[in-house]
Amino acid sequence: MKRRLAHGLRILLIIGLGIAAAFRVPVCAAQAPLDPALPSAPLVHHRGLFLFSGYGTVYDPNTPVPPMPARQKFELAFRRTVNFSTFFRAGFVTGFDEAASIGPSYGDGPHAFGQLYGYNVASLASNAFFTDALFPALFRQDPRYFRKGSGSVKSRIVWALRSEVIGYNDRGVEVPNYSRALGFGMSSALSMSYLPRQNVSFGNVVEGWAIKEAIDAGLREFREFGGISILKRIRHKR
């Protein structure tokens, strides 16, 4: 337990230092602010390759977007959960866990692999529910990622990292991103209910929370740079 706790705290410390450094670099606000005066609109879907569904990202940095009503936040979580990218990512993570001998200990064989896969699917689903739906609805925050889309590479890296802790409320005002921090923590705590008994500990909760924060930060960087540009290259070649 102590090793897991220390590992999780180290990851959180690294993330915290990165974010602290990010706040020392000036960046402009996202070029696509929320406009509460706009009428609500259907969720826009952009295929984000296989790593994420594309529902939770505002790609156009030049056009203001309307805020999301609470029902649409739950719709976002649902669409991201049932999207095939969830099952693809769960399979990728499960294969990595098996190859590296990390993650929950369900045993050996196909049955154990299936249980580990189910754990990873459930973990991704709970991430979406808490960070995209429940807490954004409670705190009236927008769960989407707003791409910066232009400027120096450094400023865009900082913008994506900064968005982990600073988000928008439904009025388009920047606020602390409570939804993500609490959402990942709640998802990690919930996972203890379907883990093998030997894997249930406070240290595992902290480690799981830290890993989810780190992965999400990495995916936001991918969305800022790779997700859209790689997709454009693929379409151009076709």
Image (tube, helix red, strand yellow):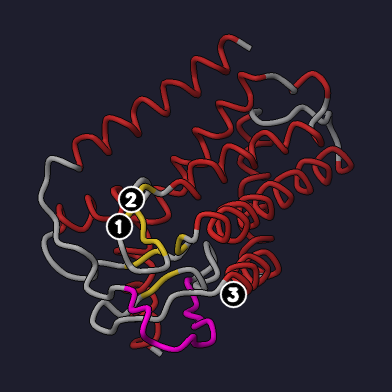
Q: Position of residue 29 (x, y in %)?
A: 20, 63
Q: Which residue is mark 1?
A: 174
* 17 left or right of 180 in image: left
202 over 116 or under it: above or below: above
Q: Are marks 1 and 2 in contact (CB under 8 Å)?
A: yes
* Picture disc at residue 105: none
Callout 1: SS: strand
Q: Earlier in the sequence, mark 3 or mark 1?
A: 3
Mark 3 Cα within 10 Å, few/some/many (few <14, many 20+)? some
Which region shows up in magenta? 34-48
- Residue at 58% x, 32% y: name it: 208
Check contact, mark 3 vs mark 2: CB within 8 A: no
Label 3 secondary element: helix
Disc on the earlier residue, 3 or 2 = 3
Quadrant of the image occupied by residue 22: top left
In the picture, the quarter occupied by the N terminus is: top right
First in residue order: circle 1 vs circle 2: 2
Which residue is rendered at x = 36% and y = 61% of the image?
168
Question: What residue is at 72 percent from the left and 38 percent from the top?
Answer: 190
Mark pair 3, 2: CA separation: 21 Å
The amino acid at mark 3 is: Gln
Q: Residues within 10 Å of mark 1 (few under 14, many from 20)?
A: some
> Would you name the residue on which mark 2 appears?
166
Mark number, residue 72? 3
**Which residue is at a point 49% across and 20% down the rendered structure image?**
7
